[in-house]
Amino acid sequence: MSLTVEIVATKPYEGQKPGTSGLRKKVKVFTQPNYTENFVQAILEANGAALVGSTLVVGGDGRFYCKEAAELIVRLSAANGVSKLLVGQNGILSTPAVSSLIRHNKALGGIVLTASHNPGGPENDFGIKFNCENGGPAPDAFTNHIYKITTEIKEYKLVRNLQIDISKVGVTSFDIAGKPFTVEVIDSVANYVRHMEEIFDFAKLKDFVSGKATGKPLKMRIDAMNGVTGSYVREIFLNRLGATESSVVHTTPLPDFGGLHPDPNLTYAKDLVDTVAQGDYDIGAAFDGDGDRNMIIGSKAFFVTPSDSLAVIAHYLEAIPYFQKNGVQGFARSMPTASAVDLVGRKLGKEVFEVPTGWKYFGNLMDAGRLCLCGEESFGTGSNHIREKDGIWAVLAWISVMQHTGKGIEDILKQHWSVYGRNYFTRYDYEECASDPCNEMVATMEKTITAPEFVGKSYSSGGKTYKVKEADNFSYTDPVDKSVATKQGLRIVFEDGSRIVVRLSGTGSSGATVRLYIDSYEKENVLGQASVMLKPLIDIALEISQLPKFTGRNAPTVIT
Ligand code: VG1
Ligand code: CO
């Protein structure tokens, strides 16, 4: 039976502007009449002529509204001339898995249904993001194009009668007004697990994890936080690497993450931190809702900052077969990330790049063969095996480093610092503040720090004095396509290399979140406590930004 395409009249919604990583709004916003339809139609149209006859990947983190949105995307894609969709079973695919699938299937792109680390459920957030054919988040030019279409949209196309059961793996073909359209519902984990097996030495890791090689099993606590990684974690760590059932927790993906805030940091992954602090574990790890973030902690909950995690992995890349085979190109980090990896890059004679916040800025460098490992301070680590950060990959990388060195996590870090010195780092998040005063704060601070007399000024606190070397609102020119991203965060760099960075989050769904990043390098004094070492700079940052005055907050919501 041939199904017909319906043209549905619609009107633009305001504010469908993708942020740091896709469009994120409350579920109640997405479920307004035509809201999701408009945005998906805009994504499809933004692909231009390439859309007709294309293959797209569709899946998300299983949060509330994922399945409905996936089914809607099937009906819209069919009507817009897409030939084939690869849809994760029940609409479930982690963000790294989508990236991997796009690349393996040479698809035109993928639509990722997630608000990532934001809470889920009917009262919380949903999100939609488009990834391009390299598997990475659409760059600014593309998302600006999507946004422009949303402001002018008058109609969308839909095959209303197309019925598809995405709970069953299998291929279904349709005739859409005389043209073939295929939906392949795929196992959510199979391709990704195969990909990890190509990158890492699973046989060696299995002997290490199970204890066959060392005489004692590796004691792990892997917390999937009821996000999408649950199914991947079970297959990889239990079935392939032989860990015991008690090594994994919260492995059932739930629409509301069981009430957890699926953000792997010291505040929201408190259960993991507390358990590992008390227990007898070698490694603890957690992921966010869509599986691209990771937090690594060692025995007694020894915390590995993401900036250090990146540097350590860079130092030990030879422990991972993928890099032995493909070689080691340059490294990169987002601007607010502490520069520990730069030191490793310098020692190894590699290019090191500093890009704005957001994984989309790494893609061009990877595609150009100049970048193989990168990370963000926001618990993002990954390599050029895909074009997204990858939480499970990061844990497998760490286990590979542990296996390779025969050392525990704390020892690995201490040794690293003894060679390279240490970048103390902290981030304060002030979540859900009122927007207007925060915008005003940033504008005022920008004025202060870009005034000519600011450079050379000294600030003192806690017996320490810092002299301003340079200050700006960070802007970035992509070395590959020369595109420019401006206003990416206020940055004050002091003469000793210490930095204060302030920016507003681009992933929140309401209000404003202020992020304050502080870092400071010590060559010798590497065993201090970050909160103590950075206290003077934090006080200076609060003074210069006048953050308490503008936000009315005396303490951050989250400290990393
Ligand atoms: C945050 C992080 C950024 C990360 C982004 C997406 O953005 O700071 O480093 O790339 O989230 O991560 P912002 O604009 O809120 O600071 V994910 O895992 O939420 O897609
Ligand atoms: Co995420």
Image: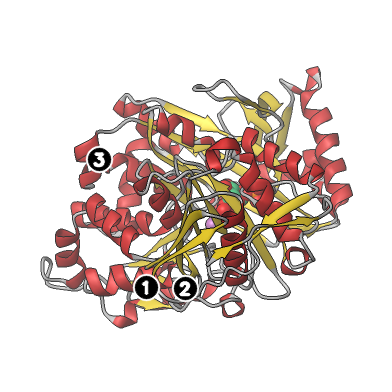
Residue at position x 23%, y 52% from top? Answer: 198
Q: Along the polypeptide, which appears first: circle 3 or circle 1? A: 1
**Where is residue 534 shown, x and y percent of the image?**
60, 46
Which residue is tagged 3?
323
Quarter of the picture containing the C terminus is: bottom right
Measuring from the top left, give residue 12's x and y in whole percent: 82, 50
Residue at image mark 2: 272
Q: Secondary structure at mark 3?
A: helix
Percent position (x, y) of residue 413?
A: 35, 50
Q: What is the CA distance from the residue labelled 3 to the residue labelled 1? A: 27 Å
**Mark 3 to mark 2: distance in Å?**
31 Å
Specify the amino acid type for callout 2: Leu
Q: Position of residue 126 (x, y in %)?
A: 66, 64
Whether label 3 touches label 1, CB < 8 Å: no
Kind of residue indicated by mark 3:
Phe
Q: Residue furthest top?
A: 452
Q: Relative to 225, is 3 above or below?
A: above
The residue closer to the viewer here, 533 or 187, is 187
- The tag on residue 138 is none
